[in-house]
Amino acid sequence: MSDTPTSEKKLKTPPARSLARLGAVLALYQMDIAGTDLSIIIDEFINARGPSALELDSQDSMQIDLSTMDKELFTDILHGMVANQKEIDTAIHSQLNEDWPMARIDTTLRAIFRASGYEMLKRSDIPPKVIINEYVEMSKAFFDGRETNMINGVLDSIAKDIRSL
């Protein structure tokens, strides 16, 4: 029998690679909104000390500690997305309704699409199912079912176009 009271259960720490993906989405969001330079944003996120607040809406926020993220994956996603943005945006746009170009998509959704699009197109060492699952699960922290379903559908279509699941 355990001596730990049930009210003191440990909180699970997300895996380092999941944190890297979340960090990349947050960094891409900041780059898009504030126009922050790539090297500055990488330095800010890599050298962050402790949790930072992420405001989800006017009533909710959560603390995120990215100190244990996979810094190599984080940096790879950002550098890779910037270097391949045109190809990534084209692949994503080809899966969207013609009336919804990338520029018209919500900034957070665009950041998720770009980070996941980079992994889908350029990281053949990562199974598509892993990429889809990671970003769909992450999106639930930001969106309701509609956007989450959209991410799933777009990534699934890209995967079918370029790789076998």
Image: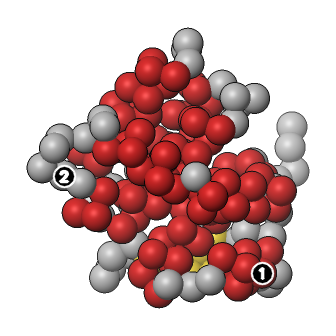
Q: Nearer the viewer, mark 2 or mark 1?
A: 2
Residue 122 occupies quadrant: top right
Residue 107 occupies quadrant: bottom left
Question: Is residue 8 visible from the viewing direction of this image?
Answer: no
Q: Residue furthest left?
A: 99
64, 40: nearer the viewer:
40
Figure check: 86 above or below 150: below
Q: Count neighbours of disc 2 (C-alpha within 10 A) and say few if under 14, some if 14 to 19, many if 20 or more.
A: few
Q: State the residue position of label 1.
A: 43
Figure check: 49 above or below 14: below
Q: Count neighbours of disc 1 (C-alpha within 10 A) and say few if under 14, some if 14 to 19, many if 20 or more.
A: few
Q: Are marks 2 and 1 in contact (CB under 8 Å)?
A: no
Q: Residue at x 83, y 56 (%)?
A: 72
- Whole-percent x, y for residue 103 in the image: 28, 64
Figure check: 34 above or below 135: below
Q: Residue at x 42, y 81 (%)?
A: 33
Report the disc number at residue 119. Answer: none
Q: State the residue position of label 2.
A: 100
- Whole-percent x, y for residue 131 in the image: 58, 35
Distance between mark 2 and mark 1 Cα atoms: 33 Å
Secondary structure under badge 1?
helix
Q: Residue at x 58, y 26 (%)?
A: 128
- Whole-percent x, y for residue 130 in the image: 62, 30
Secondary structure under badge 2?
loop
141, 150: nearer the viewer:
150
Q: Which amino acid is tagged 2?
A: Trp
